[in-house]
Image (tube, helix red, strand yellow):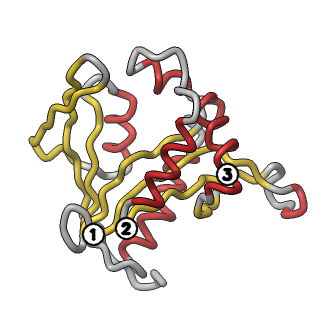
């Protein structure tokens, strides 16, 4: 169904900004009417400047089963390897454009990444934070096997503080992972 590709700032900045534009609900959580101009450019520059950080685009085929039809960028997986400690991957963002949500794309993308992390990358734990005011995100991460740790953090977002709930998932290397 979906595939993942590394995002290249030279090729994918405009496409990622379009994904952001197609996800107004995310920006509304932060009291924004949409993504800030240049957000994709800043995000992809940040990926290049942080050791171990990666941004993968979530691709959906235009016509399943027809490779000649191409694919479209519908989402983003942003993560950092061996952070905050060796063997841990910190998941910064899982985003799918709203027209493609609730169709299994994010779950399928996570399954691909999880298999690679647990197998080839040798990662045993995935951690993330989800905004307390984002029940949809919390529910999604619980559905794919993340558990609340009981930890919470506060961070400043614009002029207000946001409470972030810490979640984690043990990753298991299964025979057949390559």
Number of other residues with Cα within 10 Å of mark 1, as a class: few under 14, some 14 to 19, many 20 or more: many
- Say which of marks 1 and 3 sits in front: 3
Label 1's element? loop
Q: Residue at x 26, y 71 (%)?
A: 124
Asked whether, in this view, residue 165 is left or right of residue 40, the answer is: left
Give x and y (percent) for residue 148.
18, 43
- Distance from label 2 to label 1 (Cα)? 7 Å
Identify the residue at horizontal 48%, vertical 84% (top origin).
178
Q: Classify 116 as above or below 18.
A: below
Going 35% across and 61% down the picture, which residue do you hit? Answer: 80
C-alpha span from label 3 to label 2: 19 Å
Cβ–Cβ under 8 Å for marks 2 and 1: yes
For the N terminus, the quadrant is bottom right
Disc with the residue nearer the chain's start (1 vs 3): 3
Disc 3 designates what residue?
A: 12
| Residue, disc 1 | 82
């Amino acid at each position: 169904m979906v595939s993942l590709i590394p995002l290249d700032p030279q090729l994918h900045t405009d496409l990622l900004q379009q994904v952001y534009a197609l996800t107004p609900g995310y920006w509304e959580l932060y009291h924004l009417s949409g993504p800030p101009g240049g957000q994709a450019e800043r995000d992809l520059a940040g990926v290049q400047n942080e050791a171990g950080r990666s941004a993968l685009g979530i691709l959906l085929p235009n016509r399943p089963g027809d490779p000649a039809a191409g694919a479209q960028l519908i989402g983003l997986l942003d993560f950092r390897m061996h952070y905050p400690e060796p063997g841990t991957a910190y998941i910064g963002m899982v985003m799918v454009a709203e027209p493609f949500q609730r169709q299994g794309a994010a779950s399928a993308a996570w399954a691909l990444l999880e298999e690679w992390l647990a197998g080839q990358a040798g990662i045993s734990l995935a951690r993330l934070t989800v905004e307390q005011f984002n029940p949809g995100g919390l529910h999604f991460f619980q559905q794919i096997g993340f558990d609340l740790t009981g930890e919470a953090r506060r961070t400043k977002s614009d002029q207000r503080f946001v409470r972030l709930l810490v979640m984690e998932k043990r990753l298991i290397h299964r025979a057949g992972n390559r």
